Image (cartoon, rainbow, N blue to C red):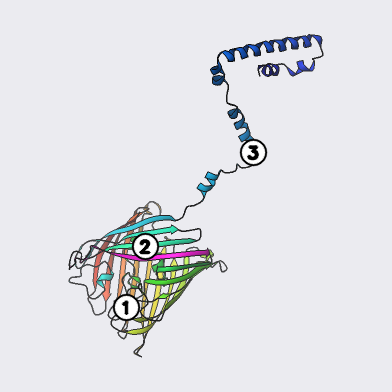
């Protein structure tokens, strides 16, 4: 080893002149000196073996670095078995998110609200605070193409602690539970309990109040309301196709219709032998990003708690501009009832128009909004006339985003009701997601 090092120190030009007698003699003397030094090193290593271990670098370390560097230039290293296993997802992959809100209302309504109308809004018989819904979303990938989703809500009860046995403090409700197979973007199959894809609001904004601009939903699609079926139990076939840059989205579903309480779905089974079905479609053209135009058709046969039976057809349409500066939402629905006993055929209509605008620059956390809505039910509609409010309403307010995950809203509402006194009030809400 030492001899090789010393030979490396000899100039290349000197080696080329090795045939010169003087140079040849010099080389012989150097080689003799090298032999002498190597013998001396061997004697010292035999006398002290630990010195060799302490001063000699590990051969593997000397070889490993150049070999790795050369390999890196040739091709990518082959991953180890452990790295390959770590890169594979482990199913199920569960994610949980939540929503909640707290509300305050001050209205000029005195005494108990008439009919179901009060229960469908944030109205109370006096001013005060109210705990909103506590909502949990569960989403889980079961494989690359199969996913499951669930939505659970807890809602405070006004009669908590009363009765025998005492009423619980909260109602627990399974709002949605869905299992879906994504064959591709054009075709997806699912079964479960859905928010009926019968209009835009019902599928875009769920039970988390933070998701929507306003405090409350339009009355035509209010949770607990009866005008449109909010929930649907059955199966859906859905997807999206480019369709010449129009981006056509569709839903085709079949399942249980309304329950005996028409504000609820047929969770435990259909109440008759007539399945409900629906077709929903909308376009989102590339040329006008943010625009959505669509409509739905829904058909069912209903039997309510009063023993009234009718064939029900629902047609709806929507026009949406999804950007926030400005935001525009407009929807219309017609509900056609044809009594099974040959009674009077009726058509009930509802619509809302809502606009909002997120302010620019340093004021971008503020978003003022306004909504006008109306529900009309003819007195001849035996299914709706006792459970659906007839009214016109104006709502104006402003939303302030405290953070990206929490918002404060304040709004003023004025309702004009048929055969009942009008009322107005101030409503506030703090909503958040986590």
Q: For the residue carrying disc 2, how many other residues have a C-alpha within 10 Å: few (<14), some (14-19), or many (20+)?
A: many
Q: Are marks 1 and 2 in contact (CB under 8 Å)?
A: no
Please name whichever residue, 47 or 176, is drawn nearer the observer in this view of the structure. Answer: 47
Position of 403 relative to 192 (above/below)? above
Q: In the figure, 38 relative to 111: above or below? A: above
Q: Residues within 10 Å of mark 3 (few under 14, many from 20)?
A: few
Which residue is identified by label 3? Answer: 73
Decide whether residue 165 is among the magenta residues.
yes
What residue is pinned by disc 2?
151
Q: Give, as a single range, the part of the protein colored magenta.
A: 156-184
Horizontally, is 126 left or right of 428 in the view?
left
Mark 3 falls on what kind of element?
A: helix
Query: What residue is pinned by disc 1?
Result: 260
Left or right of residue 153: residue 186: right
Mark 1 vs mark 3: which is more N-terminal?
A: 3
Q: Position of residue 318 (x, y in %)?
A: 43, 72
| Residue 247 visible, this angle | no
């Amino acid at each position: 080893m030492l001899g090789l090092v010393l030979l490396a120190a000899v100039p290349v030009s000197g080696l080329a002149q090795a045939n010169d007698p003087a140079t040849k003699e010099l080389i012989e003397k150097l080689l003799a000196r090298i032999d002498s030094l190597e013998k001396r090193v061997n004697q010292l290593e035999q006398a002290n073996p630990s010195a060799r271990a302490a001063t000699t670098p590990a051969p593997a370390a000397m070889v490993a670095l150049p070999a790795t560097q050369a390999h890196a230039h040739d091709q990518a290293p082959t991953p180890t078995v452990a790295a390959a296993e770590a890169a594979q997802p482990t199913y199920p992959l569960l994610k949980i998110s939540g929503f909640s809100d707290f509300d305050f209302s001050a209205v000029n309504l005195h005494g108990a609200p008439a009919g179901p109308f009060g229960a469908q809004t944030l109205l109370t018989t006096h001013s005060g605070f109210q705990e909103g819904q506590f909502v949990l979303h569960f989403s889980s990938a079961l494989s690359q193409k199969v996913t499951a989703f669930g939505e659970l809500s807890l809602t405070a009860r006004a009669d908590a602690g009363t009765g025998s046995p005492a009423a619980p403090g909260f109602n627990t409700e399974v709002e949605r539970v869905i299992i879906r197979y994504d064959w591709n973007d054009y075709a997806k199959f699912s079964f479960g309990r859905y928010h009926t894809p019968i209009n835009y609001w019902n599928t875009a904004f769920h039970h988390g109040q933070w998701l929507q601009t306003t405090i409350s939903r339009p009355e035509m699609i209010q949770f607990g309301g009866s005008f449109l079926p909010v929930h649907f139990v059955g199966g859906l076939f859905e997807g999206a196709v480019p369709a010449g840059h129009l981006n056509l989205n569709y839903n085709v579903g079949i399942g249980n219709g309304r329950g005996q309480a028409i504000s609820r779905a047929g969770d435990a089974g259909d109440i008759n032998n007539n399945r409900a079905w629906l077709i929903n479609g909308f376009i989102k053209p590339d040329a006008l990003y943010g625009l959505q135009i669509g409509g739905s058709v829904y058909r069912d046969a209903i039997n309510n708690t009063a023993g009234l039976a009718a064939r029900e057809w629902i047609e709806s349409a929507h026009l949406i501009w999804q950007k926030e500066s400005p935001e525009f939402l407009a929807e219309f629905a017609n509900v056609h009832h044809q009594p099974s006993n040959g009674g009077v055929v009726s058509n009930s209509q509802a619509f809302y128009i809502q606009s909002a605008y997120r302010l620019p620059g340093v004021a971008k956390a503020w978003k003022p909004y306004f909504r006008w809505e109306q529900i009309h039910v003819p007195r001849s509609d035996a299914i709706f006339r006792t459970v659906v409010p007839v009214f016109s309403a104006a709502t104006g307010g402003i939303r302030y985003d405290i953070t990206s995950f929490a918002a404060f809203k304040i709004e003023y509402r004025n309702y004009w009701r048929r055969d009942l006194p009008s009322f107005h009030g101030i409503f506030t809400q703090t909503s958040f997601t986590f």
